[in-house]
Amino acid sequence: EPLAVNETTNRTINVRAKGYYEFNASLGTNGQWVSMFQRDPAIVAGGNILNRTMIPETVLSTSGTTQATLFSQPFTLSRKSIVEVYFSVPVSNLLRANGQTLVDGASKLFGLNVYLSKTDSPTFSNQNIVRDTETFTNSGNNYVVGIFQLNGSRKFVLDAGTYTMNFSGFVYANPSDPVGVRATFGTNSTANSDLRSVIDIVASPVDQ
């Protein structure tokens, strides 16, 4: 007899998750189906083209170096898992620190770091797991303007535990540079077709 939604019996208590099972016959004809393992991936952030995680506009300006957290995602893994991270973040309005046009010919650096922290034992803090950078230089009136993309991805294994992943944008100009640099990270667009700002985090169990 089929079970109703969310219904279990003493023989089916372990079969509500997708995966592979065996029948525990040691309990006789009234034994249970026991989960051998299941590896259904969990979406931590993003993962849906119509409901993606986006980075709101954040302006960073400096005469040296500065960074700010653009997005933070806490999550808990109940099992050892392969974690896949992907980001694509737009950077626009590359200007002097005071907002004027950059024409000084000195190179400027902008980029994004992904930091991972674990808050339960054994703890660790702000491990840089992914990084992407770009440079910009201009000394004339006819130069490229618009949107630049920072992209990065990585796969790695994490033990069960509680984590936080921070996505931090940064800009850098040489401390002796008299004009500095300003940049805008992210976008305030909410259109489904706007794929300029995307973060995906997916966890897939690897143990039994």
Image: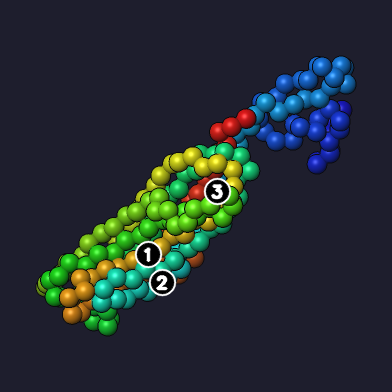
Q: Is residue 14 left or right of residue 116?
A: right
The structure residue drawn at horizontal position 50% and vertical position 61%, both measured from the top left corner, is 72
Residue 170 horizontal/vertical position (percent): 34, 66
Mark number, residue 169: 1
Residue 118 horizontal/vertical position (percent): 53, 52
Q: Is residue 171 left or right of residue 73?
A: left
Report helix, strand or loop for mark 2: strand
When the figure is inspected, residue 122 is found, relative to residue 27, above or below; the finding is below
Q: Nearer the viewer, residue 177 or 17?
A: 177
Q: Is residue 35 left or right of residue 127?
A: right
From the image, which quarter does the C terminus lie in? top right
Between marks 1 and 3 in the image, the one whose residue lies nearer the viewer: 3
Mark number, residue 122: 3
Amino acid carrying mark 3 in the image = Pro
Between marks 2 and 3 in the image, the one whose residue lies nearer the viewer: 3
The structure residue drawn at horizontal position 32% and vertical position 76%, both measured from the top left corner, is 61
Disc 1 crowd rating (10 Å Cα; few below 14, some 14-19, many 20+) is many
Residue 49 horizontal/vertical position (percent): 50, 51
Of marks 1 and 3, which one's residue comes earlier in the chain?
3
Between the C-alphas of marks 1 and 3, the distance is 27 Å
Callout 1–callout 2 Cβ contact below 8 Å: yes
Report helix, strand or loop for mark 1: strand
The structure residue drawn at horizontal position 39% and vertical position 53%, both measured from the top left corner, is 128
The structure residue drawn at horizontal position 49% and vertical position 65%, both measured from the top left corner, is 190
Report helix, strand or loop for mark 3: loop
Between the C-alphas of marks 1 and 2, the distance is 9 Å
Between marks 1 and 2 in the image, the one whose residue lies nearer the viewer: 1
Q: Nearer the viewer, residue 51 or 65?
A: 65
Of marks 2 and 3, which one's residue comes earlier in the chain?
2
From the image, which quarter does the N terminus lie in? top right
Q: Which residue is mark 2?
A: 58
Q: Quadrant of residue 96?
A: bottom left
